[in-house]
Amino acid sequence: MTKPRVLVTRRWPEAVEAKMAQAFDLHLNTSDQPLSQADLRDAMGQYDAVLPTVTDRLPAAVFDGSATRTRILANYGVGFAHIDTEAAKARGIAVTNTPDVLSECTADIAMTLLLMVARRAGEGERELREGRWTGWRPTHLIGTKVSGATLGIIGFGRIGQAMAQRAHFGFGMRILVQNRSPVPAEVLARYNATQVASVEALLPDCDFVSLHCPGGAANRHLINAARLDLMKPTAFLINTARGEVVDEHALAQSLWFNTIGGAGLDVFEREPAVPDALLNADNLVLLPHLGSATRETREAMGFRVLDNLTAFFDGRAPRDRVA
Ligand code: DGY
């Protein structure tokens, strides 16, 4: 029996590529450069499965090619707002993602950013490396205490809950939650968390706000100038979700005019471009989209794609089908 022809759009961990190559007629993008929309459109005519990731853009136009061979887009990553799932559905193309396996590491990065910005770790490291440290003094780089503070979590899915776990049990934080659907009482009780009715109701009460909602059009600029104005002038914003959830221009204004205490960002609106106004803000910690970047998690994400593809081509329902 001929093996399905499969395209992987970026390089994956070696152990996963090796397993994938045993199961499929595997084609790698050896240059590891992001594919253009034209490349992706061509690929849809040539491969039974295309395995995209967050650096690929698949709007409706990519699905317009006359001869579509692709039957499944098995995304490497939990977020899939870069794929027009309606267009995929209209063409009868299945879409899967890789939930669960990256929740802990993404929450770890959110907590890393929270701690770094609150304790001014980025500023301190820059000072030390640049030879500007003049020694200990009682007033040096005074930060904000994390333990016992109030954390607002926007989006209480798996990653939001992993963040609550760390913040509540590790740092004794009080947890407030905003989520588009009601969170079951037993889930809230696990973290002694309270769900509030709206983003507006959450922001004024929080010392820290961490974003864990999906990206895409529905949440574009969820955090805008008006909502940043609702945050305490001492509060910190953490974004490990998707860049488009925060209006970067409005955030830069808040940071420069100190209308909030600071921010920690792992994701950006136009990655890998980051506006100078953010790069030059001292009260901001920046990471290059590292949420899931551990060996264990990146391998687990790949093996989850392998499971989804194997099920699909065996005629079973892939466990992570999202469209
Ligand atoms: C995801 O899984 O959506 C990450 O942001 C990319 O790995």
Image (spheres, helix red, strand yellow):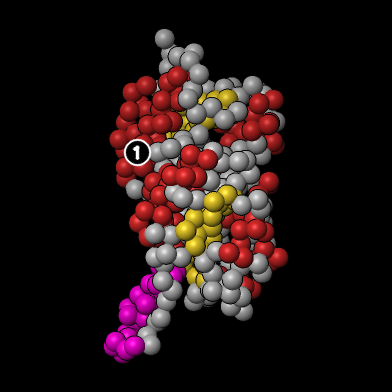
The residue drawn where x is 49% and y is 13% is: 315
The residue drawn where x is 57% and y is 49% is: 195
In this rendered view, identify the residue nearer to me: 5 or 302: 302
Count of residue discs = 1
x and y percent of residue 224 in the render? 67, 62
x and y percent of residue 85 in the render? 64, 33
The residue drawn where x is 42% and y is 21% is: 310
The residue drawn where x is 44% and y is 74% is: 144
Query: Toward which corner of the image does residue 305 lie, by quadrant?
Result: top left
* Residue at mark 1: 299
Residue 120 among magenta residues = yes
Please identify the quadrant where the N terminus is shown. Answer: top left
In this rendered view, identify the residue nearer to me: 151 or 70: 151
In this rendered view, identify the residue nearer to me: 180 or 303: 180
Magenta residue span: 116-138
The three-letter code of the residue at mark 1 reads: Glu
